[in-house]
Image: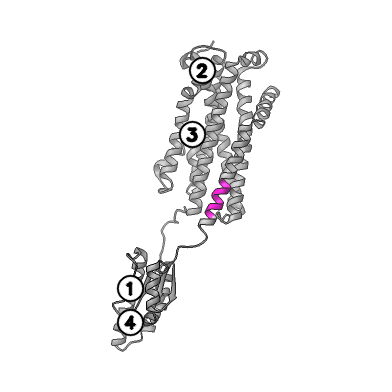
Amino acid sequence: MNVIRLIAGREIATRLRSKVFRIATVLSVVILVAIALISKLTGNGPDYQDVGITPAAAPLANVVTGSASSIQFNVRVHTVDEAAGRQQVRDGKLDALLTNSSSPVQVVVKSKLDAGLQSLLQLVAQRTALDQQVTSLGGDPAKVAAAVGTASVAVSALEPPKKANGQQLLIGILTSVLIYMALLLNGQAVAQGVVEEKTSRVVEILLATVRPWQLMIGKVIGLGTVGLIQVAIIAASGVAAGTATGTLHLHLGSAVGTIVWLVVWFLLGYTAYAFAFAAVASLVSRQEEVASAVTPVMMLLIVGYVIGISILPSQPDSGLVAALSLIPVFAPTLMPIRLALGVVPAWQAAVSVAGMVVIIPLLLWLSARIYRNAVLRSGARVKLRDAWRVR
């Protein structure tokens, strides 16, 4: 353990002094803060439709606002005379102008009536026609309007709805991207570190005093610690920026829970994939060959990420994604976004974590064997079956 600790400490110190690491961390934080600020500036309020009401259409003012409220349509009513209203429509200051209060309701627009506004004004026209009929029959339109306005629908749900609002979707997507990038970049850092030591023959000196599996584990732990620090900084900065600007409306418990799950899945995913990256990287001796060597491992990461980011936003309860998220090779990229969306039963989260806990020791044993048999071989690329044989 002392040997592993020394190797990990060396990797941590080297990585933290790297300008690339510092720049990448700062840049990621700046991007998240910028996203939060842009969302704040561009989403200060709802998009309103401006409707002008002439004196002849004044009785419709309350009908327009009441109908808009009932269908949750954002509208602003302006009282103007007809001549000024027509000019404001022509100048684009008004989206529509109502010029009379009887059926049919006359609407003036510049060129085309917005579809949502057309639906609203259709309701207004129907309400106006109904009031006229009620009046002709000797009834009170106000009482009829009150009765219609208080009418409601009682809904009984047999199952609780799946919760996946816009806030959860945003958090889920950001979590998925951060996990994917962290696993990919830190996994590649492990692979490049293995090949760098092998190319410079430093590994031969190190293995004169330490065992191959100690060197591999120390490297994985060291780079993983730095990656964890980076992920924690970026995640905390993103949540803080989103909460401070009002872009994210999270309770403290939800924010902490999001970061905790992010850290848990980074640790599980990184540990599993880092061993795989180290094993396949030990098969080659040149930096130019690293990309081709790690491609099979990267494809597993990419496939899981692409499936999650393309299916879950529109189908958060997808059975296919739920099944894949229980498989250890896909769980690190799929389970975090499902957890952020709030669509994961407790048993699925437990099974997914248990699967990772079981497969990590197996990957350690397999990777250590391949690493031990291949890391000292230079020259041509070592075939996997040759690296598997006991030397």
Residue 152 visible to an observer of this rendering: no
Q: Is residue 116 left or right of residue 170?
A: left
Mark 4–mark 2 Cα distance, whole angstroms, equals 83 Å
Q: State the CA–CA distance, disc 4 to disc 3.
A: 65 Å
Point out residue 352 in the picture as x, y percentages from the top left corner: 50, 38
Q: Is residue 196 above or below residue 26?
A: above
Start-end of magenta stretch:
32-39
Q: Which residue is mark 2?
A: 284
In the picture as drawn, the residue positioned furthest to the top comes out as 391
**Gap in Å between the C-alphas at discs 2 and 3?**
26 Å
Q: Earlier in the sequence, mark 3 or mark 1?
A: 1
- Number of marks in the rendered image: 4
The earlier-in-sequence mark between 4 and 2 is 4
> Which residue appears at 54% of the width and 14% of the height?
373
In the picture, the disc for residue 107 is: 1
Kindly indicate whether the residue at mark 3 contacts the one at mark 4 (C-beta within 8 angstroms): no
- Circle 3 is placed at which residue position? 328
Q: Amino acid at mark 3?
A: Pro
Q: Residue at x 54, y 19 (%)?
A: 282
**Residue sticking out furthest to the bottom:** 138
* Residue 36 lies in the magenta-colored region: yes
Circle 4 — which element? helix
Q: Which residue is mark 4?
A: 131
